[in-house]
Image (tube, helix red, strand yellow):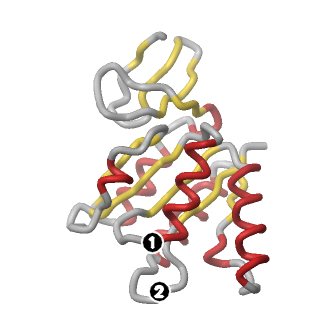
Amino acid sequence: MVEAYLSGPIVNASLRKDDFYRVVVDTLEELGITVFAPQFSPKVNPTETYRRDTNAVRMCDFVVAEVSSPSLGVGMEIMLAIELVKPILMFCRKDSKDLSYMVQGADGKALFEYESVSDVRTFLLERSLESLMVQQCPSCSSQVAEITDEGLRCILCLRKFTV
């Protein structure tokens, strides 16, 4: 069973992207992928939140992160995923002006800009998310690939390549 972790701002209500979170959870579950979404988990104390969320990142196969707005928690989850060599699918609204250089330059990620949550849904439906790995694409900035019968395919530009 493939498991995903959904990362996105939670505490600051003005930064939350609940429509994004719902679309990601619904789409991934439709694809048979189990999603841990702390955005919809019961509120617990800070220590339990840290332990629960970091454990979920450790256990997942890949991370989906909404990075349009700065968030310390999201940054910590992304860094943990990088250290664990977990593929990270980052989504940023096209009109966002606050994208961190650390996020833009992070290892192990594919960064997809979207205009609406329907773009996110389409992106997720058109990929083979059950077979992701961290691998630099020779044609674009993506560092996430799908494993296919013919070799590797970039998650972002969809070009096939071999290592």
Name which quarter of the figure residue 138 lies in.
top left
Name which quarter of the figure residue 113 lies in.
bottom left
From the viewer's perspective, is residue 120 above or below residue 72? Answer: above
| Amino acid type shown at disc 2 | Asn
Name the residue at 44% across, 76% down: 17
| Amino acid type shown at disc 1 | Ser
Name the residue at 48% across, 48% down: 89
CA neighbours of label 1 inside 10 A, class few (<14), some (14 to 19), many (20+): some
Name the residue at 55% across, 61% down: 76
Relative horizontal placement of residue 64, taking residue 98 as reference (left or right): right
Image spot of residue 155 (x, y percent): 43, 34
| Residue at mark 1 | 71
Relative horizontal placement of residue 162, taking residue 100 as reference (left or right): right
Q: Nearer the viewer, residue 4 or 104?
A: 104
Q: Nearer the viewer, residue 82 or 127?
A: 82
Name which quarter of the figure residue 132 lies in.
top right
Relative horizontal placement of residue 126, taking residue 46 as reference (left or right): left
Mark 1 and mark 2: span between their CA atoms?
A: 9 Å
From the viewer's perspective, is residue 40 above or below residue 144? Answer: below
Q: Nearer the viewer, residue 163 or 85?
A: 85
CA neighbours of label 2 inside 10 A, class few (<14), some (14 to 19), many (20+): few
| Residue at mark 2 | 12
| 1 and 2 marks in contact (CB < 8 Å) | yes
Give the position of the N terminus as an image quadrant.
top right
Image spot of residue 96 (x, y percent): 24, 67
Image spot of residue 105 (x, y percent): 34, 44
